[in-house]
Image (cartoon, coloured by chain):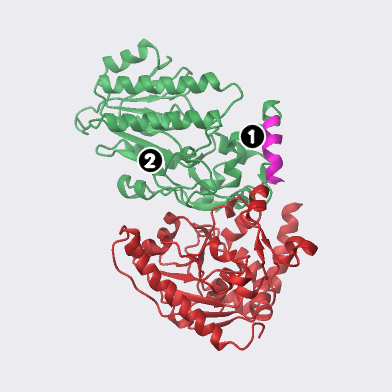
């Protein structure tokens, strides 16, 4: 009964999907087995059910504009982006951009937090859409298979920023650089303008979050009225800037200080792209 | 002394020979090697040229077999993941018995030891990379006595590998083995008409056809092969797709209810689903089979669909 209901729902959603987008998803290069699933759990048929929702957010809600998609090289590549907005919608939009607008369409694998697999529903839906738990081994394996990777080196420090800290890049982790060096993967810096204003978080109740067993607990002015619904994003306009690929060379096992120098270059590039993007935009909402 | 085709090869001792896997392995190997079986159970349908001893491996008589024959290799199948309510004594026997066997091998110059462990030992955890390699820590849930015994067993096998560099020790860690005659926990689970699943969770799983496992054991017996090897079947699939292919109707249970409910049902004998296996319904425990592919030359012969349907 349960299965029947989910089947009917997924048929309905697939029926609603834009056929042009369905065709693009069919062109994605993935190593599917006889059941149409790739070794990491990506299943294009399940991914298609998300198209109507993704398209609504991408085209009508956030009205995403992409710049410099042609900079994303074929083969292995690491997309490194700023992270914000309390909910990882910035990742969703970057992934959507590469399916909807890149030529050929590609499935970007985002490195998700290790607690995501313990969330019901989210865990397997993320996997079917091609998202991966962000472990070193997974990242290397995908790069070696010439897949594009998306990572947010700011991690939770970035996504849980309060509204006052918007567009202030937090400290970057070093792990991504070691992986890029080891896999000899070019890094494409990505600046997301718009996501940082989607939620007006005024405080992060870390202590209470720990008591409740949550990773974080952002508070917005609406939280007392509508609870978790206050995290629903505002319809800001998203602008995605893809920069020219940066290629680094060196020993992946170098001292932190050596790696940090290279990371600094990526961080500065993204900072500059954010700055330019902010100057170019006229308004947060359009 | 590697067994050569011209002279008669040294005999192979198989422990746990009377089980389904042991019998199938014997049918495959007895044309290549003289086979000596050790198992307390009777060996039904034993080929004429196979010698079978119905004894406990911890007895003096088991040691006599190693002393009297110039045993070339030991294949130890004594470990199958099939938890039972009265399993305590059985588990302890297993670890002690294996240590005894390894002692005999070292004492009487056995050149090859093949030990059948399991990829279960890695444990299903949210932090697992999608494909665990052989050097990943054995992170199985130590709160489960079955798992603790398996991990202890595998660690004994590893320390034997390091302590006796002259003996070619092969530890095989296959993923869930399935087959018509297989009666391990994952096969029994997949045979349920209404298997319990966890609401909102659908981990990727790997299955291995029983005959492909036999092929891997055969390859491990080749001279020169040593080390720890994950043995992986033809592919990966979400649990739900496997159940659908088998025509099952899963019963999704919210995960916070599942543990207490299934534990009580198990204790009262109402369900044969071992609660210690619950993490495998929630998180993936998949392994990388690259080493077995490259160093053993292992290629599963059965397709993914054939492997799944081997349950039926």
Q: Is residue B312 visible?
A: no
Q: Is residue A170 left or right of residue A6?
A: left
Badge 2: residue crowd in 10 Å (few <14, some 14–19, many ≥20): many
Residue at 40 percent of width and 67 percent of height: A146
Instruction: Identify the residue at the far top of this view.
Output: B60
Quadrant housing the C terminus of chain B: top right
Name the colour assigned to chain B in the rendering. Answer: green
Q: Is residue A57 above or below residue B179?
A: below
In the image, residue B240 sits, relative to residue A90, either above or below, namely above
A20 and B86: which is toward the camera: B86
Magenta region: B247-264
- In the image, is residue A119 part of the stretch drawn in magenta? no
Q: Nearer the viewer, residue B306 or A273?
A: A273
Residue at mark 2: chain:
B
Mark 1 or mark 2, earlier in chain: 2
The residue tagged 2 is B216
Query: What residue is drawn where x is 58% and y is 63%?
Result: A129
State the image coordinates of residue B213 (x, y, percent, origin top left): 43, 40
Please, is residue B182 above or below residue B128 in the view?
above
């Amino acid at each position: 009964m349960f299965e029947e209901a989910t089947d009917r729902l997924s048929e309905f959603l697939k029926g609603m999907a834009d056929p042009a987008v369905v065709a693009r998803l069919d062109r994605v290069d993935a190593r599917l087995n006889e059941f149409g699933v790739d070794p990491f759990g990506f299943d294009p048929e399940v991914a298609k059910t998300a198209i109507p929702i993704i398209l609504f957010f991408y085209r009508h809600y956030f009205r995403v504009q992409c710049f410099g998609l042609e900079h994303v090289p074929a083969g292995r590549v690491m997309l490194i982006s700023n992270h914000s907005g309390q909910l990882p919608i910035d990742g969703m939009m970057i992934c959507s951009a590469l399916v909807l607008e890149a030529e050929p369409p590609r499935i970007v694998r985002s490195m998700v937090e290790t607690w995501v697999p313990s969330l019901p529903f989210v865990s397997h839906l993320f996997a079917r859409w091609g998202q991966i738990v962000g472990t070193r081994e997974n990242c290397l394996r995908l790069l070696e298979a010439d897949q594009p990777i998306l990572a947010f080196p700011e991690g939770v420090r970035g996504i849980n920023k309060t509204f006052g800290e918007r567009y202030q890049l937090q400290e970057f982790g070093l792990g991504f650089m070691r992986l890029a060096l080891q896999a000899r993967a070019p890094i494409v810096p990505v600046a997301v303008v718009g996501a940082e204003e989607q939620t007006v978080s005024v405080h992060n109740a870390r202590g209470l979050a720990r008591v409740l067993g949550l990773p974080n607990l952002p508070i917005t002015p609406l939280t007392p009225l509508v609870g978790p619904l206050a995290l629903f994003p505002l319809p800001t306009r998203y602008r995605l800037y893809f920069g020219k690929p940066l290629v680094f060379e060196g020993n992946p096992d170098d001292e932190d200080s050596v790696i940090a120098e290279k990371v600094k270059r990526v961080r500065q590039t993204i900072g500059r792209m954010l700055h330019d993007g902010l100057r170019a935009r006229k308004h947060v909402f359009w | 002394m590697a067994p050569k085709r011209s002279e008669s090869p040294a005999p192979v001792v198989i422990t746990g020979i009377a089980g389904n896997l042991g019998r199938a392995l014997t049918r495959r190997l007895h044309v290549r090697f003289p086979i000596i079986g050790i198992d307390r159970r009777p060996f039904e349908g034993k080929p004429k040229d196979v010698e079978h001893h119905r004894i406990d491996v911890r007895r003096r008589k088991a040691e006599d077999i190693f002393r009297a024959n110039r045993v070339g290799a030991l294949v130890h199948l004594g470990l199958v993941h099939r938890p039972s309510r009265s399993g305590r004594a059985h588990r302890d026997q297993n670890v002690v018995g294996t240590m005894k066997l390894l002692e005999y091998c070292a004492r009487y110059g056995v050149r090859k030891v093949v030990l059948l462990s399991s990829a279960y030992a890695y444990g299903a955890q949210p932090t697992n990379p999608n494909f665990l390699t052989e050097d990943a820590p054995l992170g199985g849930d130590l709160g489960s006595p079955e798992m603790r015994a398996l991990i202890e067993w595998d660690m004994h096998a590893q320390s034997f590998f390091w302590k006796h560099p002259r003996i070619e020790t092969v530890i095989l860690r296959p993923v869930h083995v399935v087959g018509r005659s297989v009666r391990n926990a994952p096969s029994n689970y997949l045979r349920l008409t209404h298997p319990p699943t966890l609401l909102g969770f659908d981990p990727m799983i790997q299955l291995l056809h029983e005959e492909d496992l036999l092929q891997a054991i055969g390859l491990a017996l080749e001279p020169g092969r040593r080390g720890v090897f994950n043995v992986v079947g033809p592919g990966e699939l979400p649990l739900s797709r496997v159940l659908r292919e088998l025509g099952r109707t899963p019963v999704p249970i919210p995960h916070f209810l599942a543990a207490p409910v299934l534990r009580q049902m198990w204790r009262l004998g109402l369900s044969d689903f071992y609660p210690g296996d619950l993490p495998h319904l929630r998180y993936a425990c998949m392994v990388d089979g690259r080493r077995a592919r490259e160093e053993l030359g292992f290629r599963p012969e059965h397709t993914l669909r054939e492997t799944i349907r081997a349950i039926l």
